[in-house]
Image (cartoon, rainbow, N blue to C red):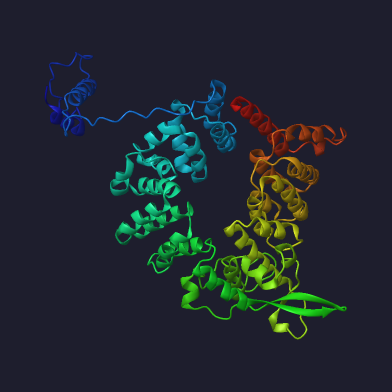
Amino acid sequence: MSGWNEHVTAALLGTERRDPPVLPEAPDGPGGDKAGRLLDQAALLAVARRAGRVPRHGAPEVIAPAPAEDAPAVPPAAAARLGRILRGEHIQVLPEWLDAAAERGLRVPARLLPELLERGRGDRMLRPSIIRAAGRRGVWLALRNTDWAYLVGAGGDPGGGAEVWETGTRNQRAAYLTGLRRTDPAAAREALRETWAKEPAPDRAAFLATFRDGLSPGDEEFLEAALEDRGKDVRQLAADLLARLPGSAYGRRMAARARACLAPRVRTVRGREQTWIMVEPPRAHDEELARDGVPFHPSGSFAPGGGGGPVGTRAAWLREILARTPLGTWTGLFGLPPMEIVCLPVASAAGASSPQHDAGDARDVHIGWARAALKQHDTEWARALLKGGVMVDEPGALADLLAVLPAGERDAAAAGLIRWVEGRSDMLLVLERVPGPWTGDLAAAVVATLAASAGRAGAPGRHRDEHALTQLCRLAEQRLDPSAASRLEDLAARRPPDEPERAVPRAVTALIATLRFRDEMLKELAP
């Protein structure tokens, strides 16, 4: 069977100018229809060409079968609900479904993995939840589709053993190094040291990030050398990791700088001696400070400003230095526990002759300490900053500390923080930093806030309040304890019947529906 080129020529010129060639093998078409005959014969030729094509590289590659799963799939009802979620029904609860399944030792059914992995390709925030619930077959699929390779880099087993470090992709090698750091940090460090000089900067940064697992004083020498790296991201990662190492030379350098900025001064006020914190932000920026990870223009350091707006460059340097200073520096310097230190009055050293409490300097100091408590995961300092009456104009800095508290303390501390900022524009900023599930005192505070916001949003002309309520409900859909649905329904039922224009806002009814959906979802995943 031949004549493909002749058929192409007839198609390009048109059957009015060139008769299609005769193809005896083709079935007879309607008489006189040259165009129809051309198309029928072209279809027959196309099928013949494809069927007769010989593979270019011999026998096709044999793909290794997927490994056996060590976790059972979720129950059929839960799998059916996951399918509905992936098709768009309450899609915002997908991370919770995945995390709940993983916590119960269950995995995603194999038939839903392609759709789930494809969704993770466009949603980076979803990836950690996917890796926890995808099972071994999820990683097996990711290794055969470059679009899903993120699953390997996110912590999945790259497969192939130690040779992956020599031959794998960046994601596979990072996954291998992550696993090795968890079992033998020294071996992982030495493996990276051998290839470090040959790695491109993006790979060096990806591999250095694995040092978060198993970080120890044994890594200090390697990280100090990385401070001289030509890659900016590598240098910043090295500085951040060194700031988490207690007793390191990096910490001692930062402590020396910090003590030059903060000093205790004892004053007699109304016949009583009182310790003040005198603040002198850094006056200059040098190469050593830059080497240790403090940029010349830290994020947000523009013109001086009040509130939560941009801060002056010197104040930004101060915050960065304090954030990288071991918190034990201050208990040693002041001889007080953290709860008492955060309550000390703060004044500018420029007014040392007659110091007055300076809210701006106090804000910079407390924000620096809050960042340090978060980096160093210091529970005592986090508790002191949250409970010590510290009034910073960036409550988000305090909200970040909730993750440092023991689980039993988080709800009450978060509820107190929410009540403090209630009615302010940064309420949502705080709530976004409060991880779910919101239960107990925290759930009660959120429900009270929702009720108050719904009341304001229902009034005529309160479009701004309606927008804020909608944002709050969308956040609560994912984090509020599903049992709160009944309390929200009770609030709706108590509305006066003679106020139809003050009906329950649509955002609240959508929230109640989502909470009901989540409640059924979690019951289906329960053992």
**On the picture, is 45 further left or further right than 187?**
left
In the picture, the quarter occupied by the N terminus is top left
**Residue in front for this viewpoint, 90 or 358:** 358
Q: Position of residue 486 (x, y in %)?
A: 76, 31
Question: 136 above or below 20?
Answer: below
Q: Position of residue 518 (x, y in %)?
A: 64, 31
**Residue in front for this viewpoint, 364 or 376:** 376
Looking at the rendering, which quadrant does residue 90 occupy? Answer: top right
Q: Position of residue 215 (x, y in %)?
A: 48, 56
**On the picture, is 302 further left or further right than 157?**
right
**Residue in front for this viewpoint, 336 or 71:** 336
Q: Residue at x 41, y 58 (%)?
A: 205
The answer to whether residue 457 is visible is: no
Looking at the rendering, which quadrant does residue 487 occupy? Answer: top right
Question: 48 above or below 197?
Answer: above
**On the picture, is 104 further left or further right than 349?**
left
